[in-house]
Image (cartoon, coloured by chain):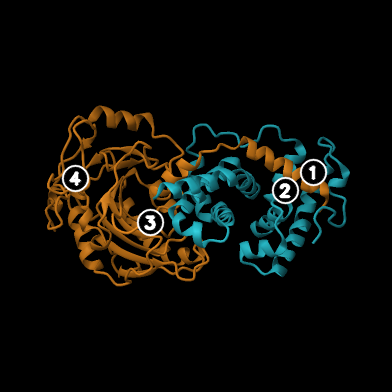
Chain colours: A orange, B cyan
Amino acid sequence: MSTDFDSTLSEALNLAADAAQIPGPAAARTRGRKRTVYQRIAISTTSLALVAIAATVAFKAVPSHANTTPVASTSTKFTVSAGNSAGSSSVKNSAGTASKGTSGDPHKVVPGAWLAADQLPFADTFKWKVEQADSQGSPIGQPLTPSVYYVANDTSYQSLTMCSDPSWLLPRTTGAQHSEFLATTGTGNNQASQYLFFFATDGDAKLTFNNLTKQYGPTCQQHDGGAEPVLTAGNIYAPPQPLMNEMVWLTVKGKSSAPDLADYTREYFVLRGNVIAYVAVTSYTDTSLPTKYDDDALLSTISSHLSVYRDTGK
Amino acid sequence: MAVGLEADFDAFYTTTYRSIISQIYAMTGSLHEAEDCVQEAYARAWQQWSRMSTETGSPEAWVRTVAARLAVSSWRKAVNRLKAHRREQQQSDEVAGMSPDHIAVVAALRKISPDQRMAIVLYHFAGLSIEEIAAETGAAPGTVKARLSRGRKALAPHLTEFADNPDRPRSPQFFNQPQPSGRGI
């Protein structure tokens, strides 16, 4: 390759560097802290108007529970739908029945749909605390409450779940809601998240869940340098067996060549009606977390909260 | 995280951003893509900075590797395809001030394999040695040499084609060197 190639390449790339926007280290830290989320496209003015105009009601979710999600203040405007709050870890099935449930709507927060901090996986270990908007704002989306964010379906995600083609999740929804939790114990970087993904129809949600089950394993291994996700609860959909509505995946970094893979990720998926709930615990520093966990109990807890949404069974 | 860690990370970001963004731009051919991949890589670095800053030999290489991995991810491409048609106004990816030669080089890089592209960018632009590229990409030194050699051969027809275009003249020595005269290997 000629010297001219070297100099021309250098000139071109230096021009590109000159033209590049520099978001800055603070933005990178915020983005890293809020998981791997990046919103490139602004929420539509229609969505903003819906949130701003429709909501005048504030709620308080179980004042006796400091780390409960969601938490609302009287100064925050958002839309709240009927439903019980996820106030206590003792709540196992406090929400409405299937016939009384509401259809999932990404612009409406149903308090009963959300797990409390002490209901999340490894709550005893990490003492999760819900993260609320701070002075740096949030790159995640538009706050519906101080701790629950609306995420538009055209938001750019580098990696939402640990595995599977991301085009099979958020882009196919009508929007999502997200809440983030940080560990209050230890010094390591440990996080927990809960998402609710909303679909236009129950069929769309079912189709997406089906594809997630099929793509999770092999796609993951190829992309993440050989890391092998392990299904610890639920089943891979294989007709003619009926589609399961819940699954749990454990991914440990092990000897994976992917440098940025978390040491430990445990992910829970539950389908109900037109909603898919996603709960995940991610640790970048704690390799001692057990591979065995009471996933069935956790799935049951998530399911009980999701019962605020109707399930037509179609 | 401690304030000291933040300051450490910020200094690292400030001193390395320019070189990394230019290298990832060479990988993607899109400045917007490069910006997104690089910022994402820095965000992931921050997620484990307390450990990286003490245990990782070269955080810069780490960020570059992660950004490059994101840049070639088929997952990202799938998402971006979906995103692209939703954009009401596609922002131009042209970089101001680039000559036809510059554009030709960047476009040609897009036509060779990601492994070859990575090797060429790291060698000819970042100035890494064969051994350093091998360490960073997880390939054997011999493999790196092969990627460089094959990459150059793969580039040649694309650049020659451009040079032969009478509407876009350029310096003849750009393509006609039978052996590398820049950085030999």
Q: Which comes sooner in the sequence, label 2 or label 1?
A: 2
Q: Is residue B40 left or right of residue A145?
A: right
Numbered disc 1: secondary structure: helix
- Disc number lying in front (3 or 1): 3
Mark number for residue B108? 2
Name the amino acid, label 1: Phe
Q: How many marks?
A: 4
Q: Residues within 10 Å of mark 3 (few under 14, many from 20)?
A: many
Instruction: Tell me whether the residue at label 2 lies in contact with that at label 1, contact meaning CB atoms closer than 8 angstroms.
Output: yes
Q: Which residue is disc 4 drawn over?
A: A111
Answer few, some or many: residues within 10 Å of disc 2's Cα (few below 14, many 20 plus, some between 14 and 19). Answer: many
Dots 4, 3 in contact, CB < 8 A: no
Q: Nearer the viewer, residue B151 or A206?
A: B151
The subunit letter for the residue under badge 2 reads B
Distance between the Cα atoms at labels 1 and 4? 61 Å
Q: Quadrant of residue A295?
A: bottom left
Labels 2, 4: one chain? no
Do callouts 4 and 3 point to residues on the same chain? yes
Regarding residue A234, the answer to whether it shows in the image is no
Taking depth in this image into account, of B61 and B146 the one nearest to the observer is B61
Q: Are marks 3 and 2 in contact (CB under 8 Å)?
A: no
Do badges 3 and 2 share one subunit? no
Question: Is A63 on the left or on the right of A120, as rendered?
Answer: left
Q: CA distance from mark 4 to mark 3?
A: 27 Å
Instruction: Kindly identify which numbered label has been placed on residue A189.
Output: 3
Element on which disc 3 rests: loop
Residue appearing at x 67%, y 32% in the figure: B96
